Amino acid sequence: MATPLTADRLFKALRDEGLTVIEHRSWRTNNRNHKGPWGPMHGVMIHHTVTSGTANSVELCYNGHSALPGPLCHGVIAKDGTVHLVGNGRTNHAGLGDGDVLRAVAAEAKTLPVDNEANTDGNRHFYGFECVNLGDGKDPWPAVQLEAIERAAAALCRVHGWSQRSVIGHLEWQPGKIDPRGFTMNSMRDRIGKRLAPDPAPTKPPATKPPTPTMPTPPKQPVVDLSKLIAAARSNPKATGTPVTYAGVRIVEAALVDAGYLTKPLLDGHFGTATVTAYSRWQKSKAGGGYKGAAADGIPGKDSLTRLGKKYGFTVTP
């Protein structure tokens, strides 16, 4: 888990890794942050563009198209190895993918589970690089482009303290996807791992043995106290202003935003009438339990809240 990089830090990380980086138009403010949360970050995702030519590929990834608004990634890696930055913040590159895969990436597991579900927002948690290639299995991947993919992914892993296991392909995240096609992600992770490895020890061993590096501790999911949440839901609609009566309200509201039942400007920690209405819609949904009548009154219950937490990344205590 990591805080998203600022535009300046993203640019510097790529340059420090030896890449040629081009800032395309107003990439620093080009994002989809109004559509949902951005972060915390868990990894880097690699794609192919299904296009040819640098200029039109970069412009497409900056603007998007009628079916999918841009930006479509954070950086476009051209055939010549140049990285063109087109977005900073939430971008439309990952879509919904498998929550089990996200948990494995966050824990930097040695193997990834099969991506057989599309239940988790990947745009929130992954940096994305689109690599110019037709994706037909025939279009070649120049050595300089593969090295740029290696360097770009390693740059973000290095600055966040991640290993190569935090880098995945789109085909490992979302069912039915095939990108990137033309090289394997295992081979790319091997390359990234070698780049991130410390310099070889000198021929003569040092006097003291260096400590064994430890793997990062997997991030813990946030916890929501059901009784405190219910108290907030019952008292907040009557309160004036927008008092934050219980910090867990923000966690639940963020999940309701991800589910599409609450608009982002109302994510304020106040379980007011808008949040009650949004939660009622969740209770009535199939995913929320399909409750009806008084059982879908917008006051959280253990079953509906547990379902929300399982889908959007938090746990529930009584």
Image: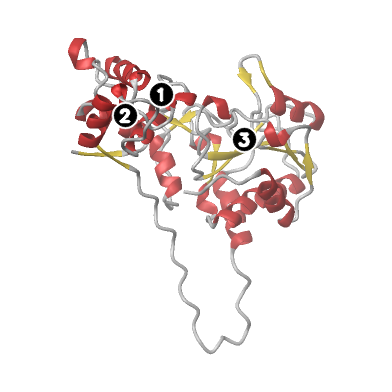
Q: Are marks 1 and 2 in contact (CB under 8 Å)?
A: yes
Circle 3 residue: 47
Three-letter code, disc 2: Leu
Mark 2: which secondary structure?
helix
Q: Are marks 2 and 3 in contact (CB under 8 Å)?
A: no
The answer to which of 312 and 183 lies nearer the viewer is 312
Does residue 65 show up?
yes
Circle 1 residue: 259
- Label 2 crowd (10 A; few <14 / some 14-19 / many >=20): many
The answer to which of 272 and 114 lies nearer the viewer is 272
Task: State the residue at coordinates (53%, 25%).
Answer: 35
Which labelled disc corresponds to residue 196?
A: none
Count of numbered marks: 3
Q: Quadrant of residue 268?
A: top left
Q: Quadrant of residue 129?
A: top right
Is 3 situated above or below 100?
below
* Marks 1 and 2, how far apart at CA: 9 Å
Task: State the residue at coordinates (44%, 66%).
Answer: 214
Three-letter code, disc 1: Ala
Which labelled disc corresponds to residue 308?
A: 2
Three-letter code, disc 3: His
Task: State the residue at coordinates (42%, 21%).
Answer: 262
Q: Earlier in the sequence, mark 1 or mark 3?
A: 3
